Image (spheres, rainbow, N blue to C red):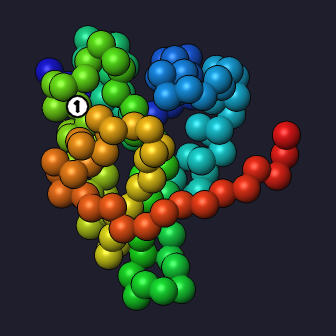
Amino acid sequence: MIEIRPITPEDAAAVGRLLQQLGYAVEPLQVSGRIGQLGKTGSDPILLAVSDRRVLGFIAMHVSQMLQYERPVMRVTALVVDCRARRRGIGKLLMDRAESLASTAGCEIVELTSAATRAEAHAFYRSIGYEPNSLRFRKVLVA
């Protein structure tokens, strides 16, 4: 059985390993600190999918009010399912929970970004009802 639960700083090592699967090298101490910071905002829930005490995936979200929308927006800032646990419905469970939290928070939209090279992720998002609608631009300020 898969349990969806809030993250704790003790989950940092497992989350760091999952972030590596997306290409982000983040040390467990950094992850733990960020979990603490985000946990204080009230706008940045992070949930884990766990089975038999093994972390299978996580979803991080941010709820914010934007000028252009009447109601808040939930942005999925990270979604990772362990490569050995994919195609078992875990990503959908996490996204369903995000949508439920967004609805409870009065959000009008759930949005996310996904790297242009992640075709399988794009197919997943389309399969659960998400549509591409913009192109993200960014500029790195710190080297």
Q: Residue at x 49, y 28 (%)?
A: 22
Q: Is residue 13 left or right of residue 3?
A: right
Q: Is residue 54 above or below residue 19?
A: above
Q: Residue at x 33, y 61 (%)?
A: 132
Q: Where's residue 56, x and y in %? A: 33, 21
Instruction: Name which residue type carries label 1.
Output: Ile
Q: Is residue 105 left or right of residue 30?
A: left
Q: Residue at x 36, y 68 (%)?
A: 133
Between 131 and 45, the one lying in front of the other is 131
Q: Is residue 40 visible?
A: yes
Between 100 and 130, the one lying in front of the other is 130
Between 8 and 55, the one lying in front of the other is 55
Q: Where's residue 129, x and y in %? A: 18, 57
Q: Residue at x 45, y 34 (%)?
A: 7
Q: Is residue 89 above or below residue 126?
A: above
Name the residue tied to disc 1.
90
**Quadrant that contains the N terminus:** top left
